[in-house]
Image (tube, rainbow, N blue to C red):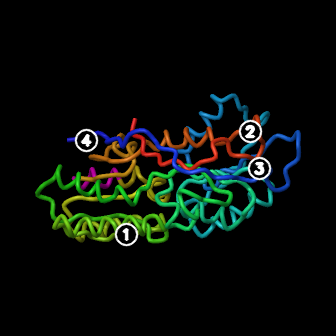
Amino acid sequence: MRVRALGLGIPLVIALLAVPPLAEGQHAGKVPRVGLLNYEEFWSPLLQKLTELGYVDGRTIQFEYRASGGRPERLPALAQELVQRRVDLIVTYGTPVTQAAKLATSKIPIVMVGIGDPVKAGLVGSLGHPGGNITGNTILGPDIGAKRLQLLREALPNALRVAFLWNPQNASNVVQFENVQRAARALGLTLLSVQVSDPSKLDSALAAVMKERPDALMMTADPVQQAFVKQIVQFTAATRLPSVFQIRENVIAGGLMSYGPSLPELFRRAAVYVDISKHVGRVNTESIVVDAVAA
């Protein structure tokens, strides 16, 4: 049985965010440079949308790609590289990547994609008055984690033990784990914590899952996990372990069910924040969006 991803309605613009009119080191007339911090293949909808908006790589826009190779300890140095390259804007996905960008610069505009909880992660002051140089979209992942667990219980009423795969180095994941833990107690479920923050330890983490003999598996949208989600989906299929995901595309890849946004749509929405043609180094839609879209 495969359950389709469940949508959460139309995104709601709930906050305004002022950003500096010019990025560090910007010069009029030059081709603007956009840094893509910790770029992965699944970011491609961002580039596709920018192409649809009329931008031509190498002519009207230039990209600086930086990838950590699944090593989060490299993120601060990669963010500093982009600052030293005098990029006009930085795009990030996930809380740890955005935190690294924020530490690297307080002046270059940062467009964040799919952040779980930007307030509790310390990225913005509040949704009502964020301040600073960061904008983008948030899916409020920690708040709907409990709902995913509830839906899993409804789909699998006999499930009693649920393994939760999460990244303790991701501040949004920490909040989500706490919320899911409370929901598990309320539902009479045993939540088995399985931590993984390093891709090299994914195999051992999955082996630990099977030792716990869970009835189902939940996971987050952490960038480390999403970079290796095919391996995780193959694992759940091979072990016949029912799984619930945060991202719709994980179901398309073979997972059982999801409740949350479409990851490609999040990146497409982020592309329109970059208004290169009118205001180099500015953010087009100066607002934080609660974005929980499932196509």
On residue 88, the disc is 3
Which mark sits nearer the N-terminus, 1 or 2? 1
Q: Quadrant of the N terminus?
A: top left
Question: What span is colored magenta in the figure?
Answer: 233-241
Pointers 4 and 2 in contact (C-beta within 8 Å): no
Which mark sits nearer the N-terminus, 3 or 4? 4
Which mark sits nearer the N-terminus, 4 or 2? 4
Q: Amino acid at mark 4?
A: Val
Q: Amino acid at mark 3?
A: Asp
> What residue is disc 2 on?
276
Q: Nearer the viewer, residue 85 or 108?
A: 108
Q: Quadrant of the C terminus?
A: top left
Q: Amino acid at mark 1?
A: Ser
> What residue is disc 1 on?
204
What's the CA distance linking mark 3 and mark 4?
42 Å
What's the CA distance linking mark 4 and mark 2?
40 Å
What's the CA distance linking mark 4 and mark 1?
28 Å
Pointers 3 and 4 in contact (C-beta within 8 Å): no
Look at discs 1 and 3 and give the one toward the viewer.
3
> What residue is disc 4 on?
3
Q: Would residue 122 appear left or right of 278 to someone viewing this image? A: left
- Find residue 143 and report its image quarter: bottom left
SS at badge 2: loop
Look at discs 3 and 4 and give the one toward the viewer.
3
Look at discs 1 and 2 and give the one toward the viewer.
2
Label 2 packing within 10 angstroms: few (<14), some (14-19), many (20+): many
What's the CA distance linking mark 3 and mark 2?
9 Å
